[in-house]
Amino acid sequence: MLPSLAVSLIERDGYAWAFLAALGAILLVSVPQVILIKPEDRTMYTRDGMAIAGISWVCMSVMGCLPLVFAGICGFADAFFEIASGFTTTGASVLSNMESLPRSIAFLRSFTHWVGGMGVLVLTTAVLPGASGGGSLARAESSGPSFSKLMPKVGDSSKMLYFIYTALTALLFLALLLCGMDGFDSLLHAMSTAGTGGFSNKSLSIGYYDSVSVDIVISVFMLMFGVCFVVYFKLISRDVKGAFKSQELWAYLGVSVLCTVLIAANISSIYGGFAGGLRYSFFQVSSIVSTTGFSTADFDLWPAFSKALLLLLMLMGSCAGSTAGGLKMIRVILLVKLAGREVTRAFKPRSVKVIKLDGKSVPEDMLGHIAVFFFVYALIIVAGMISLALSGCDLLESISGSVACISNIGPAFGRFGPMGGFGFLPPVTKIILALIMLAGRLELYPLLILFFPSAWRKN
C-alpha cells in the first residue's frame, strides 16, 4: 500500500485516506496474530508451504482490494476480482474508462502485477532470507513443474531473481521513455509488462499510442519476460552455451515465430498487406503467448483461424520459471512426447522408450505428475465454463473466458475481448473466476489443498 499512498500524496488526488484506512485494516488483522500466536514448532514442510501460499494469496487479494472499496471505485466482488487479477498477473478487468481512474489507483493496479509476477513469497525469502521454510514457500509459488535454485541458499536465489527482474523492468522503462511515452505511463506499462499482466491506464491499451516503436519494444520485452529467468542468470554467469541449450526456450520461440507468420498472412487483407499484418500479429502473439494481455487491435474481429491459434497459445503459455502463466511450454513438450510414446506402445507393446529433455532422462513420476496436472487443469477450465455459461455467456465466451482466467491471460473473445471486460458478470461468478485465477497462478495445488480436509490434519 505504501508506494500507492505515496503516489496519492504526490498527486493530491484525494484518495490517500483510502490507502491509510486499508493499511489500518491490515495492521488491525495482522499485529494481534504476530503478538499472540507463538508456535512452538516452526518447522515447515511441503504441505505447510503450499497451504501458506494458498492462504497468503487469498488474504492479500482480500486486503489489497480494500482501497478500491473504501474509495468507492467499485463494490467488494468487483474489487476482489480486480486485485486478484492484478496479483495473479491476469489483467482481466471489471472497470471501464481507465482514463478516469485516479493515478494512485492506476498505479496500484500495475504495481500488483509487478509484485505478483515474480511472487510475493519469493520477495519474502529475498527480504528475510533467514525465514524458516523459504524453500517450501518458493516451490509453492514457483512458475512451473519444478523449482530451480540459482544459488545454494534460497534467499540468495530470490535476491538474484529480483535483481534480474528489476533490471529488465528498468531497461523497459527507459526504452518506453525513448519511444516518447511519458514517465508515469512508462512506469505503469513497464511494471505490467514485467509481470506479464496487461493492466493499462488507457481504455485502448497499447493501441492508444498508435506507435510502431512502442509496439515493437513492448512486444520484445513481453517475449523476454516469458523466458525462464535461469536463462538470464546463465547469461550473466557467462554460460552462453548452457543458456541456449534449453529445448523449452527454442520451442517457445519457434511456436511464437510460426504463429506470428501464420496469423500475419491470415490478417494481411485487414491491415493492407503482410507488413501491416506482421506488426499486429507479432504484438498480439507476444502478448498472448507470454500471457500479458495487452492489445493494439481488436483481435476478436480477426478470422477464425487466427482466433484458433490465439486460443491455443492461451493454453500453452510461456516457459516455466518466468512471470507468465498457462500450462508452460515444458509441460506441453513432455505431454507431446508422452503421447507419442503411448501411441508407439500401442503397436509395439514391448518397446521401452525413455523420455528425455535437454539430454536428460525425465523421471516417470514427474511424467505422471504432469499428466495429472493437465487433467486437473482441464477440469478447472470446465468448471469455469459451466459457471460462465450459467451467467449467460455463449460457448466461445465460456471457453475462452475460462481459459483466459486460469492461464492468467486477461482478454478473451466475445464480450471478454480486448475492447470488452468482465464487469457484466454477476458477483458470484466474479468470485469464482478470481479463485480460478489464483489457482492458475499458484499452479493449482496450493489453492486446491485448502479445500481438502485431510491437508489440515496434524498427522
Image (cartoon, rainbow, N blue to C red):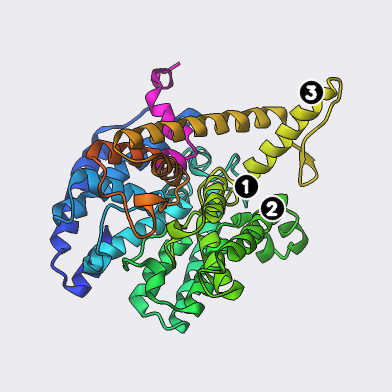
Looking at the image, residue 358 lies above or below residue 182: above
Residue placed at 54% from the left, 73% from the top?
216
Helix, strand or loop under label 3: helix
Quadrant of the snapshot with the N terminus: bottom left
Q: Quadrant of residue 12?
A: bottom left
Pick whichever of labels 1 and 2 is earlier in the sequence: 2
Residue at image mark 3: 346
Q: Quadrant of residue 429?
A: top left
Q: Is residue 206 visible?
A: yes
Pick whichever of labels 3 and 2 is earlier in the sequence: 2
Q: Are marks 1 and 2 in contact (CB under 8 Å)?
A: yes
Identify the magenta region: 437-459
Q: Is residue 50 visible?
A: no
Helix, strand or loop under label 1: helix
Magenta highlight on residue 457: yes
Residue at image mark 1: 329
Q: Position of residue 179 (x, y in %)?
A: 46, 82
The rendered magenta stretch, by its main secondary structure, is classed as helix
Pick whichever of labels 3 and 1 is earlier in the sequence: 1
Q: CA distance from mark 1 to mark 2?
A: 7 Å
